[in-house]
Image: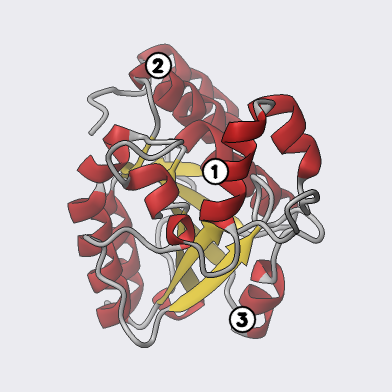
Amino acid sequence: MHDVAIGQDILDRVMARRGRVHLFDSLDPAETALVVIDMQNFFCAPGAPAEVAEAREIVPAINQLASEMRQLGGLVIWVTWVMNGTETTSDWQAFLDHFLGDPEKIGVAKELLKPGGHGTEVWQDLQVEPGDVYVPKNRYSALINGASGLERLLRSASIRNLLLAGTKTNVCVESTGRDAMMLDFNVVVVADCCATSLDREHLATLETFIQQFGDVMTKDEVVATMRRKQN
């Protein structure tokens, strides 16, 4: 788990701008979803093509927060990266061509990330319950137009608040969070439930996000904020 803290200079800037560090005094669990992003074999399994070893370290924290969400009446959503296509095409071919490039790596990614592929399965140590929802996506952001059905799901469930967890903090979590804010959702990045490859990458996202896109809290702070609404 990343052992970092948002710099005091950043917090001072936030205070000067809006007069408080945290945006939300309370969050109604009935209007809140925990969105867990890309905690799947392709990123979490040892030796996986896109392994983020740090992602395995946040599993207990995600399980705890998901359990609290269910008890409080919130929604738990598992978002995973899935690619559709054929041997010669993909619904995100530009990514494969520009960021993988090597034909052998592209072939492995397509096989692991095809619908039902081993790489798309939620990591084995995560506790998924029958009432949870699964949403596939095919872009970094689950909320960019055409990437998934996440926005429609959230709107139909009257969800206003998103708690973001998963990997990578600075790629799919951050991309989804930015789009969520610009779609007028209230967004919290749950710092100890997110992971990426390096501490400085993780911290850069937290420091950017709290200034411009939403809030940053720990899982315990988030739970306390939701419980405050019920009291």
| Residue 92: image location, x then y, percent | 76, 47
Question: As rendered, which of 212 and 149 lies closer to the eye?
Answer: 149
Q: Mark 2 or mark 1: which is in front?
A: 1
Q: Earlier in the sequence, mark 3 or mark 1?
A: 1
Decide: is 204 above or below 192: above
What type is the residue that disc 1 sits on? Answer: Val
Q: Label 3, label 2: how many angstroms apart (C-alpha)?
A: 35 Å
| Residue 112: image location, x then y, percent | 51, 53
Please indicate whether residue 34 sits to the left or right of residue 3 in the image: right
Extreme residue toward the top, this view: 9
Q: Mark 2 highlights which residue?
A: 200
Question: As rendered, which of 50 and 6 lies closer to the eye?
Answer: 50
What type is the residue that disc 3 sits on? Answer: Ser
Question: As rendered, which of 124 and 30 lies closer to the eye?
Answer: 124
Please indicate whether residue 125 sits to the left or right of residue 34 in the image: left
- Please report the residue visible at 32 percent of the width from the left and 58 percent of the height from the top: 123
Q: Label 2, label 1: how many angstroms apart (C-alpha)?
A: 29 Å
Q: Quadrant location of the C terminus?
A: bottom left
| Residue 51: image location, x then y, percent | 38, 36
Decide: is 156 above or below 164: below
- Please report the residue visible at 29 percent of the width from the left and 45 percent of the height from the top: 218
Callout 3 crowding tier (Cα within 10 Å): few <14, some 14–19, many ≥20: few
Q: Specify the quadrant of the image occupied by residue 146.
A: bottom right
Q: Mark 1 highlights which residue?
A: 108
- Please report the residue visible at 20 percent of the width from the left and 62 percent of the height from the top: 64
Q: Mark 2 and mark 3 in contact (Cβ < 8 Å)?
A: no
Q: Earlier in the sequence, mark 3 or mark 2?
A: 3
Q: Secondary structure at mark 2?
A: helix
| Residue 140: image location, x then y, percent | 64, 44
Q: Mark 3 highlights which residue?
A: 158
